């Protein structure tokens, strides 16, 4: 498992200070809407200046017509980030167009598709997708696998079933991780690190439990220690 830390703080200064405090650890930095909309490309450059080896996941969940998504994917590849994501509900043509467009890049970023947001409970999910989370997540995962994506964003609870219907090498990145049972906040389907490991999760994503802790670095150390023992 590789830990992915969500940089969701209210200013670039705070996010960069968090990154600085974690620069000696082997962790992924997740740059989401808040940071990217506010701080853009410079923020990515700022992270690389702190540690050129930081792996960066740009969590912008692209969703548009295929050509627009492929254009955006290409711009993302040029930023030099290591992973980004699209919404699986954009469909198989969008997936294929994105992957085709990236095929000319020597070291393209990993591409994941969002299946079901971890903030959905079953009732609210069915109101939108008219299927159960499990059923839809597996269907989206198969579609992503067949179109050459590298993995999916899902909850820990779907990780194993998704690997069973795709491949054990198909990556699962799972937000909603509460390493030591911390407050779930708006997340509806949360899991501990132990469960994430059992379910074959490749990338546990942790935001608030780290950046709201009074000592984020020691929290990350504790998390990495548990992860290495699993
Ligand atoms: O603070 P917390 O640990 O809940 O942060 C989870 C992070 O993962 C947030 O940045 C959120 O936007 C992101 N995310 C998510 N569910 C998804 C995809 C991304 O919670 N399905």
Image (cartoon, helix red, strand yellow):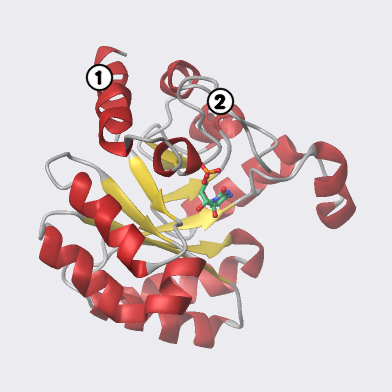
Residue 62 shows in this picture:
yes
Q: Is residue 87 left or right of residue 108?
A: right
Residue 39, quarter of the rendered image? bottom left
Judging from the image, what secondary structure is the residue with disc 2 in? loop
Look at mark 2 in the image and give the residue it sits on: 191
What mark, if any, has residue 225 been given in the picture? 1
Above or below residue 22? Residue 82 is: below
- Please tell me whether mark 1 sits on a helix, a strand or a loop: helix
Image coordinates of residue 95 in percent, x first then y, are 51, 68
Q: Residue at x 32, y 25 (%)?
A: 223
Foreground pick, 138 / 156:
156
Q: Can residue 103 be seen at all in this image of the molecule?
A: no
Q: Looking at this rendering, what residue extends furthest in the top direction?
A: 229
Q: Is 180 above or below relative to 207? A: above
In the image, residue 129 sits, relative to residue 181, either above or below, namely below
Q: Is residue 89 left or right of residue 217?
A: right
- Looking at the image, residue 18 sits to the left or right of residue 23; the answer is right
Q: Is the residue marked by circle 1 packed among few (<14), some (14-19), or many (20+) residues within 10 Å?
A: few
**C-alpha span from label 1 to label 2:** 17 Å
How far across and how far down the image is residue 163, in percent? 48, 33
How packed is label 2: few (under 14 Cα within 10 Å), some, or many (20 or more)? many
Percent coordinates x, y for residue 132 in the rendering: 80, 39
Judge left or right: residue 165 versus residue 131: left
Query: Image quarter for residue 71?
Result: bottom left
Disc assigned to residue 193 = none
User: If the image is split into quadrants, where does the C terminus sit?
Assistant: top left
Q: Nearer the viewer, residue 62 or 130?
A: 62
Give the residue drawn at x 46%, y 41%. 212
Whichever of labels 1 and 2 marks the residue nearer the N terminus, that label is: 2
Q: Nearer the viewer, mark 1 or mark 2?
A: 1
């Amino acid at each position: 498992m590789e830990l992915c830390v969500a940089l969701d703080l209210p200013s670039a200064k705070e996010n960069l200070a968090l990154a600085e405090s974690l620069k000696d650890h082997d962790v992924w930095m997740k740059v989401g809407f808040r940071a990217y909309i506010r701080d853009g490309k410079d923020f990515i450059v700022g992270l690389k200046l702190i540690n050129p080896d930081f792996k960066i996941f740009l969590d912008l969940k692209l969703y548009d017509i295929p050509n627009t998504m492929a254009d955006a994917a290409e711009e993302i590849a040029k930023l030099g980030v290591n992973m980004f994501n699209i919404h699986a509900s954009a469909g198989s043509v969008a997936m294929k167009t994105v992957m085709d467009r990236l095929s000319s890049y020597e070291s393209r970023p990993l591409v994941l598709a969002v299946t079901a947001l971890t903030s959905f409970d079953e009732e609210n999910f069915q109101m939108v997708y008219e299927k159960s989370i499990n059923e839809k997540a597996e269907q989206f995962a198969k579609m992503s696998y067949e179109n050459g994506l590298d993995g999916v964003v899902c909850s820990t609870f779907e990780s194993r079933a998704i690997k069973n219907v795709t491949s054990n090498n198909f990556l699962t990145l799972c937000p909603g991780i509460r390493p030591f049972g911390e407050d779930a906040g708006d997340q509806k389907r949360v899991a501990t690190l132990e469960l994430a490991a059992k379910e074959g999760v490749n990338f546990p994503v942790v935001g608030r439990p780290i950046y709201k802790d009074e000592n984020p670095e020691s929290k990350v150390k504790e998390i990495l220690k548990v992860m290495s023992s699993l």
